[in-house]
Amino acid sequence: MDLEELTLPYYLKVFSFTSIIFLFLFLFYIFSIFNKNLIFNTNPINIKKGENIETIFSKNINNLSNLDIRFFKLYLKIIYLDKNSFIHYGDFYFNNNASFLDFIAIITKPSNVLNKITIVEGWSKKELDIELSKNFKDYNSIEYSKIIADTYFIQQNIEFNSFVNQLQNIKIDYFTKYKNNKLFNKFDQNEILILGSLLEKEGLDTIDKRMISSVIFNRLKKNMKLQIDATVLFAITNGEYNLNRKLLFSDLKIDHPFNTYIYKGLPPQPISYVGKKTLDILFENYETDFLFYFYNKSLNKHIFSKTFKEHKQKLND
């Protein structure tokens, strides 16, 4: 056996051993890098629209080497044909000891940093506009009939139109829950929101709203004018300011489509935003024999009556 025949097996053994060592080191590197606890410059981090993965890593994580970043870039290119298409923009919060896989799992979903917007029952558009201005650079007033008043948690940097669509979908889901309620035999969805807005402006609490709803139902059934003061206030102010005075008898004669002292039936549109709790009250279809009510300031509550004679008597008591 000559020297060449002895040398070839030797080099093959060396090559095989070296390959095994290299493979072991490579697998160890992969294991360690995937399980490395990332150290963030800030938490939450902000990813701007259009930022590439290299910039995201180098700007926000301070314990990755250039080799690490190149490896992650290659990995993501294999997993995602377009390595930037999966990245969401916005603010992202990470738990302590987050790994690379944790990082990717979070930035491939919408922002997990939430803002809270509370739309108060009975609010006017002007009041909601003030709240919207705190969260959106560009926004429009939202019609009363488009959404339901509630507390909403939203992603930071969400676009205004997406926010409105989100609220409208929540409203659709809410009304779907009551689609078989007998209230829909008498009123459509917009009319129910109108009814709700009247309760928001007139009612003091759940019991009071329940009682007032029965009065409204009864008066509509008898084709009586609703004669609700809140509609006169809206006719005067359009919900843009507080009147800061008591209604005058002359105010009740204002010829305006929202004035329920002049026109029978419901106003054309809601006069405020309506909350779920108030809508729930309407869907109870609460029944009484009352046709009249007024607010007693000394007792701080509404007084209800079945007849006009009884109503006048209680007014004079």
Image (cartoon, rainbow, N blue to C red):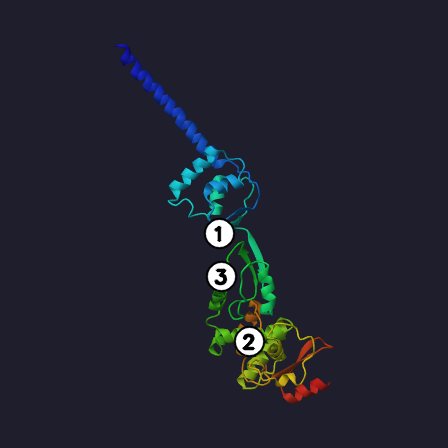
Occupied quadrant, residue 246: bottom right
Q: Which residue is mark 3?
A: 161
Image x and y of residue 210, in percent = 60, 75
Answer above or below: position of 280 versus 225.
Answer: above
Q: Nearer the viewer, mark 2 or mark 1?
A: 1
213 horizontally vs 69: left or right? right
Q: CA distance from mark 2 to mark 3?
A: 27 Å
79 horizontally vs 308: left or right? left
* Marked residue nearer the N-terminal end (2 or 1): 1
Answer above or below: position of 64 versus 163.
Answer: above
131 or 13: nearer the viewer: 131
Image x and y of residue 166, in percent = 49, 61
Q: How many marks?
A: 3
Occupied quadrant, residue 308: bottom right
* Marked residue nearer the N-terminal end (2 or 3): 3
**Where the N terminus falls, by quadrant?**
top left
Q: CA distance from mark 2 to mark 1?
A: 37 Å
**Where the C terminus falls, by quadrant?**
bottom right
Q: Which residue is mark 2?
A: 195
Image x and y of residue 245, in percent = 70, 77
User: Residue type at mark 1?
Assistant: Pro
Mark 3 surroundings: few (<14), some (14-19) or many (≥20) residues within 10 A: few
Any part of residue 79 in sight:
yes
User: Residue type at mark 3?
Assistant: Asn
Q: Which residue is mark 1?
A: 110
Q: Residue shown at 60%/63% (left/top)?
A: 130
Q: Secondary structure at mark 2?
A: helix
* Marked residue nearer the N-terminal end (3 or 1): 1
Mark 2 surroundings: few (<14), some (14-19) or many (≥20) residues within 10 A: many
